[in-house]
């Protein structure tokens, strides 16, 4: 059992022979970010993304406040666990953030998965900076997409790779094109950009002429980002922001994007960057438009899938 000591920034590990009597066997921390309280720990054994690699362990810890984007966030440490103590790796990339957006906090793993399956996380799609101010009714808040985890090891170092579990909801699909095209929410994009000479490029999702969400790659600052400053309702002073994540050299400019009525979930660079942001556009319409800083087309390939609703439809009988 992993237990958080929130203000001491430690995780303690306990064992028990009967789930009644618990014995302290080790502790981890302080380490990484200690700007806020530590909570919602999870220790996960994660297989490699490719054959021939070795399993690693990830210790995931929620922190509030203190995330790079402000407010709630989650850091992870990759390393080894011998059944008693966790030892973090010293390799590049062994420490990071599970999500670089504003709205994915305190993710927990599913129990009871079939043997050999990769662990699956699901998070709270919100931020304590404005959780009580969301302009929704009759519900307030939702969960993120579940995503399968694996460990990627390449020339840039280690990375926690996340793959959204979304394929069962796919219906029809069409190829993406550089010119604007309409899409019915919810939908999924799978996009691959060739190595461009542009300083910035990506996708804008328009709800009307004055409101859009921009998802892009900044090759000068070496950042991936989601900009929701023009998306719609501002909710609170800290809501209209651009969330960013560092790009790793050598990894592809690819993007999986899942768009719902009030959320954008992005997975970039082979799933090593996850970014989840709430948005509140003024209309349910969505127009996909590629862009580049120069205005010239960038070579892209990809598809857009319509997604079916997760809600059971009422019977006609």
Image (cartoon, rainbow, N blue to C red):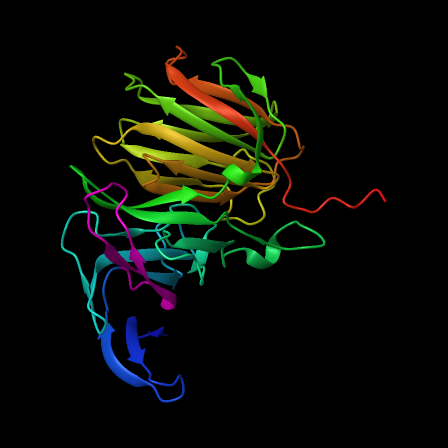
> Quadrant of residue 130 in the image?
bottom right
Residue drawn at (35%, 49%) of the image: 149
| Residue 14 x %, y % | 30, 79
Rendered position, 300 above or below 279 = above
Rendered position, 19 above or below 34 = below
Which residue is at the front of the view, 170 or 191? Answer: 170
Q: Magenta span has 57?
A: yes
Range of magenta residues: 33-59
Residue drawn at (72%, 54%) of the image: 138
| Residue 34 x %, y % | 29, 64
Visible residue check, residue 77: yes
| Residue 184 x %, y % | 63, 28
Which residue is at the front of the view, 170 or 290? Answer: 170
Visible residue check, residue 201: no
Residue drawn at (25%, 41%) of the image: 50
Residue at the farthest bottom position: 21
């Amino acid at each position: 059992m992993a237990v958080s000591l929130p203000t001491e920034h430690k995780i303690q590990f306990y064992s028990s022979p009967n789930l009644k009597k618990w014995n302290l066997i080790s502790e981890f921390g302080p380490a990484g970010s200690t700007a806020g309280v530590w909570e919602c720990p999870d220790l996960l054994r994660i297989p490699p993304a490719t054959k021939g690699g070795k399993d690693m362990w990830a210790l995931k810890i929620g922190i509030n406040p203190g995330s790079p984007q402000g407010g709630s966030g989650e850091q992870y440490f990759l390393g080894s666990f011998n059944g008693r103590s966790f030892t973090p790796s010293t390799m590049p990339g062994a420490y990071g953030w599970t999500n670089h957006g504003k709205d994915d906090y305190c993710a927990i793993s599913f129990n009871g998965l079939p043997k050999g399956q990769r662990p699956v996380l699901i998070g709270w799609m919100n931020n304590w900076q404005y959780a009580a101010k969301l302009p929704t009714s009759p519900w307030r808040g939702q969960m993120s997409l579940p995503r399968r985890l694996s460990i990627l090891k390449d020339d840039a170092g280690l990375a926690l790779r996340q793959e959204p579990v979304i394929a069962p909801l796919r219906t029809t699909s069409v190829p993406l094109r550089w010119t604007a095209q309409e899409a019915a929410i919810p939908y999924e994009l799978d996009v691959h950009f060739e190595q461009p000479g542009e300083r910035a490029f990506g996708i804008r999702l328009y709800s009307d002429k004055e409101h859009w969400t921009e998802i892009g790659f900044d090759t000068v600052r070496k950042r991936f980002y989601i900009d929701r400053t023009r998306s719609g309702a501002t909710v609170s002073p800290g809501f209209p922001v651009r969330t960013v994540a560092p790009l790793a050299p050598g990894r592809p400019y690819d993007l999986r994007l899942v768009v719902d009525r009030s959320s954008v979930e992005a997975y970039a660079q082979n799933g090593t960057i996850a970014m989840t942001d709430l948005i509140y556009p003024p209309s349910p319409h969505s127009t996909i438009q590629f862009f580049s800083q120069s205005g010239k087309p960038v070579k892209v390939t990809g598809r857009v899938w319509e997604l079916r609703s997760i809600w059971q439809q009422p019977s006609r009988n």
